[in-house]
Image (tube, rainbow, N blue to C red):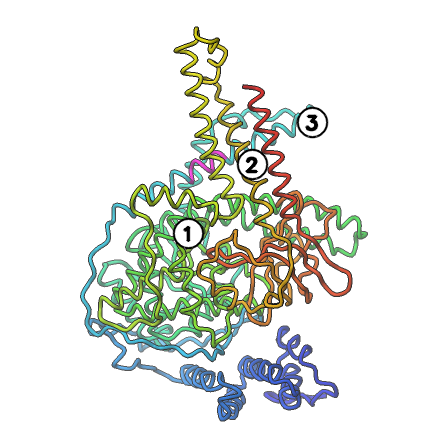
């Protein structure tokens, strides 16, 4: 059958919504259009028709049939009650169609700040044509959304805010680098000690002398080399793996003139060169700034960011990214990201090699499985180093985001646009994860340079369009333990950031984009801190609570024993107290007390933390937005839930640790935590049924819903079709950890 361009194949004899979605995923848009059009016109289920129409609009758009997409949206917009999203989509497509075909596009005069200066364009150059993405999975998607935005106004004239205290910012930066250096040195020493322990079993090999040498100078050289080579190393990664292309300023000015103006004003005002602009074909909104000096700075953004944000929103995002250049925090962060690429790329290559060996046809099944094991283990070690080395950077990463938001809002006078941009980016990232059915490596490996983390965007960005976002952000503003629960996050809480942006809007007498409750401030006095610490066990996850409580009780116990030993020294001749003198000098006692206190805490709290899963009717397949509404919820107050959906995540050895397990339900996305009975390392053992084997299948998940800085479910059972299932061992792992800690503590006390 010969198909004319921009035509739809004959209607299939048995149209299928699933086959249409599958054809759309593999970029066979003609087949997808044929199936989806038939389903949309004949199916009786309104939800199926709505999904078919939405995907059909995207298929028309990606097949370069903009006229068909516009006509369909016009027809659907005549029934706003059944298709409330059609009007917004029609406006969105019309705007994009005009931008793509306009020779020049000027921004509305009322949106240009009074302090704006016209950009120096280059009329002698013709705009370069947009290069179409080669693969459908990285194509820029149309932002089909029925969400109504307030579109709060911007400041026409505004007064600058009081300058922040810069010395705190620099002090945090120095402390971050010192901690990172210490962690790298500890990693080296621990790795060498483990290797030497393994070589005891192979006495024929003598380790070289440099193993025992000090690693201070090599680590300093590594850090310095990463900072110096960061621009070119990161350039090479983006060009080779992600096909980064240059983005001339005049090309950016055609579709986003205000963004180009803001960039030129920034460079003139701060007397720095214009950063090199680049673009990558990525279906998720993504932007990073890196370099080791203003002259080597780069700003790289994705096609989806250009497509999904309005001009004023993109302008304030670019201005907030520019803050890293003028504040010079791009130097340590770029060097750190360049360093982190080493273990992350090693993790990717080793895991992909293991997946390839597992399916290599020249090997028997057992041979592929046997060769995949060492690749998977090595990939897990590399990923562990990546995760460990980024820990010292998290606090500074959160703080620099606050400075960037303030800088961008103050320079453009448009904090409301930044609030909308952050929320739209969360929606775009969540949509791309849903479409790709896994987290893109670029979103994880570069998250410290992004304005938004993919983990934050996962559940928040996937909520239905009619869900009030202000209600979903109440937890971020009012939960008293929110800051403690965000200690291992790379970005500040979304509610905190938007609340500060609302404060900036109020300062300039602007209505805010979202109405949020007043943020509960952190405790200021020592008494308040002590009271909060006393109740921390009721709010923090079980392992963190046990560690803090074990340290507190262990130190108190050690002080009491030290006091008894000191008194025995002073009054040793009375009542035979000299026998207790050893308590004052026994260092092993402290370790034993901490370990035993840690063990007791786990044993006492384990039943309450993992209650019996008895699913109430309201907890059977609940909506994500309903679970997120409770602003007082903390991890120990869990809800047993039963969720149905599709299991998403990276395939094979890329996901052996369970780091990318996501459940796609009818109401959004939910992060899953899965632990084997021997803990995270137990996921690497070959005999348990790994959850990664169920990726891509329709599953039912039983577990405990918990709310921290991001919501998640601690998995108990993942059940697929038939009898195929896998069971988590998190409670068993905690019990084993408690027993091991008790035995180690008793051993230390015995040795003392």
Q: On residue 481, which mark appears? A: 1
Q: Position of residue 236 (x, y in %)?
A: 48, 55
Q: Is residue 745 within the magenta segment?
A: no
Say which quarter of the image contains residue 423.
bottom left
CB-based contact (under 8 Å), mark 3 and mark 2 = no
Q: Earlier in the sequence, mark 3 or mark 2?
A: 3
Residue sitting nearer the eye, 416 or 91: 416
Magenta-drawn segment: 180-186
Q: Image quadrant for the N terminus? A: bottom right
Q: Image quadrant for the C terminus? A: top right
User: Which residue is identified by label 2?
Assistant: 600
Mark 2 closeness class: few <14, some 14–19, many ≥20 residues within 10 Å: some
* Relative side of 598 to 158, left or right: right
Say which quarter of the image contains residue 518.
bottom left
User: Which residue is identified by label 3?
Assistant: 202
Q: Position of residue 212 (x, y in %)?
A: 53, 25
Query: Which element carries disc 1, helix, strand or loop?
Result: loop
Q: Position of residue 445 (x, y in %)?
A: 50, 54
Report the residue at 45% width, 52% height from top: 489
Mark nearest the camera among 2 and 1 is: 2
């Amino acid at each position: 059958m010969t198909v004319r361009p921009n035509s739809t194949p004959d209607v299939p004899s048995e149209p299928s919504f699933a086959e249409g979605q599958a054809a759309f995923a593999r970029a066979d848009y003609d087949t997808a259009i044929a199936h989806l059009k038939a389903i949309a016109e004949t199916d009786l289920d309104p939800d199926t028709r709505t999904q078919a129409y939405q995907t059909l609009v995207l298929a028309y758009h990606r097949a370069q049939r903009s006229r068909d997409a516009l006509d369909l949206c016009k027809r659907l917009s005549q029934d706003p009650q059944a298709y409330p999203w059609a009007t917004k989509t029609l406006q969105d497509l019309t705007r994009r169609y005009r931008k793509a075909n306009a020779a020049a596009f000027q921004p509305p005069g009322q949106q240009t700040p009074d302090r704006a200066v016209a950009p120096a364009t280059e009329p002698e150059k013709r705009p370069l044509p947009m290069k179409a993405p080669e693969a459908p999975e990285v194509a820029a998607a149309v932002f089909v959304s029925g969400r109504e935005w307030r579109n709060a106004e911007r400041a026409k004239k505004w007064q600058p805010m009081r300058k922040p205290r810069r010395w705190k910012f620099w002090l945090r930066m120095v402390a971050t680098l010192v901690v990172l250096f210490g962690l790298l040195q500890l990693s080296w020493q621990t790795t060498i000690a483990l290797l030497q322990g393994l070589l005891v079993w192979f006495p024929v090999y003598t380790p070289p002398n440099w193993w025992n040498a000090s690693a201070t100078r090599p680590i300093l050289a590594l850090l310095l080399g990463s900072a110096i080579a960061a621009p070119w190393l990161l350039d090479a990664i983006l060009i080779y793996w992600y096909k980064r292309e240059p983005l001339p300023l005049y090309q950016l000015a055609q579709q986003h003139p205000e963004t180009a103006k803001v960039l030129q004003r920034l460079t003139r005002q701060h007397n720095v060169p214009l950063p090199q602009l680049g673009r990558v074909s990525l279906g998720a909104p993504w932007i990073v700034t890196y370099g080791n000096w203003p002259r080597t700075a780069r700003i790289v953004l994705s096609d989806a960011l250009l497509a999904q944000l309005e001009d004023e929103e993109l302008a304030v995002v670019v201005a907030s990214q520019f803050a890293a250049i003028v504040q010079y925090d791009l130097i340590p962060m770029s060097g750190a990201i360049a360093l982190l690429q080493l273990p992350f790329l090693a993790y990717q290559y080793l895991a992909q090699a293991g997946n390839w060996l597992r399916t290599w046809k020249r090997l028997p099944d057992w041979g592929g499985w046997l060769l995949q094991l060492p690749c998977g283990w090595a990939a897990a070690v590399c990923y562990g180093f990546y995760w460990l080395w980024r820990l010292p950077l998290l606090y500074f990463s959160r703080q620099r985001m606050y400075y960037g938001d303030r800088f961008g809002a103050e320079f453009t006078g448009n904090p409301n646009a930044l609030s909308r941009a952050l929320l739209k980016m969360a929606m775009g990232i969540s949509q791309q994860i849903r479409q790709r059915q896994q987290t893109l490596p670029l979103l994880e490996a570069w998250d410290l340079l992004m304005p938004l983390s993919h983990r934050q965007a996962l559940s928040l960005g996937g909520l239905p369009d009619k869900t009030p976002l202000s209600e979903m952000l109440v937890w971020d503003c009012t939960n008293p333990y929110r800051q403690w629960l965000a200690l291992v996050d790379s970005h500040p809480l979304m509610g905190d950031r938007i609340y500060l942006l609302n404060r900036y809007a109020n300062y300039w007498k602007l209505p805010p984009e979202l109405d949020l409750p007043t943020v509960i401030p952190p405790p200021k006095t020592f008494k308040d801190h002590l009271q909060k610490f006393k109740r921390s066990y009721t709010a923090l996850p079980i392992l963190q609570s046990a560690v803090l409580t074990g340290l507190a009780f262990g130190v108190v116990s050690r002080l009491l024993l030290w006091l008894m030993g000191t008194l025995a020294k002073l009054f040793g001749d009375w009542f035979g107290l000299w026998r207790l003198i050893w308590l004052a000098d026994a260092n092993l006692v402290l370790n034993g007390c901490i370990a035993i206190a840690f063990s007791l805490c786990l044993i006492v709290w384990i039943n309450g933390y993992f209650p019996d899963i008895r699913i109430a009717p309201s907890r059977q397949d609940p909506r994500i937005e309903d679970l997120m509404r409770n602003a007082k919820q903390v991890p120990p107050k869990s809800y047993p839930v039963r969720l149905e959906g599709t299991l998403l995540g990276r395939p094979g050895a890329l996901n052996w640790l369970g780091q990318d397990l996501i459940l796609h339900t009818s109401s959004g996305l939910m992060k899953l935590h899965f632990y084997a009975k021997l803990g995270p390392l137990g996921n690497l053992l070959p005999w348990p049924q790994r959850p990664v084997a169920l990726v891509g299948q329709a599953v039912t998940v039983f577990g405990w819903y918990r709310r921290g800085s991001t919501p998640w479910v601690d998995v108990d059972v993942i059940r697929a079709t038939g009898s195929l299932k896998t069971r988590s061992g998190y409670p068993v792992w905690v019990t084993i950890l408690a027993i091991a800690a008790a035995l180690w503590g008793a051993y230390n006390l015995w040795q003392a």
